[in-house]
Image (cartoon, helix red, strand yellow):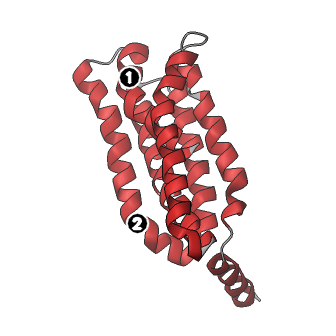
Amino acid sequence: MVMLCEGAANDWSAVHLKDVLGASAGLAAFAYGAFAAAMTVGRLLADRLVMRFGSVAILRHGATMAAIGITLVALGPSVWAVFSGWALFGLGLSGCVPQLFSAAGHADPSAAGANVSRVAGLGDVGMLAGPAVIGWLTHLVTLGHAFVLLTLLCVTTAVGARVLRTESDRTHGQEMTVGSR
């Protein structure tokens, strides 16, 4: 679901700004730039944040942030609001994929390679399917409304984040509980 969202952003961000909000082609290209720059910053910070808050929190809060960002894109009344939405979407998604790969590698250490390969393969399917799914939806609804699917996928990811519960997350949760008493 997360990689499908990334794939959709890769191929539809500039098209959305140009076709829906009437931005020039040059200005519309900055939509993907905002998404990619925010994602890069988030990926650079993700490991430190995971160490502090745990992978479940990063996945949950990142997916929630991404849902807010893509909703702003879908409903944004101006080019600048949509730029902000794409940046928030990228920042939110930035820590999600690494947590999924990490969880796959730690789920069964004896099958770490196979598990990471499966997650990467499914991620690639999502990355490739994202643009096609959004394109298909545009035959039924407007492009902005098609992005609501991405909101739903991000919300589903946030709700299901607990699936990533690892031993370090359990220990991290106990430390927080002990420290707060």
Residue 93: percent from left, percent from top: 49, 50
Judge whether residue 100 can be spotted in this image: yes
Of mark 1 and mark 2, the one earlier in the sequence is 1
Q: Give the residue displayed 22% in from the left and 24% down from the top.
A: 26
Q: Give the residue displayed 67% in from the left and 58% down from the top.
A: 161
Residue 70: percent from left, percent from top: 53, 36
Residue 45, label in figure: 2
Q: Quadrant of the C terminus?
A: bottom right
Q: Amino acid at mark 1?
A: Leu
- Reply above or below: 107 against 32: below
Residue 80: percent from left, percent from top: 38, 32
Identify the residue at the far right of this view: 181
- Direction from residue 149 to residue 73 in the image, left or right: left
Q: Give the residue displayed 54% in from the left and 77% down from the top.
A: 52
> Quick one: SS at disc 2?
helix
> Quick one: SS at disc 1?
helix
Q: Which residue is mark 1?
A: 17
Residue 115, label in figure: none
Marks 1 and 2, how far apart in space? Answer: 28 Å
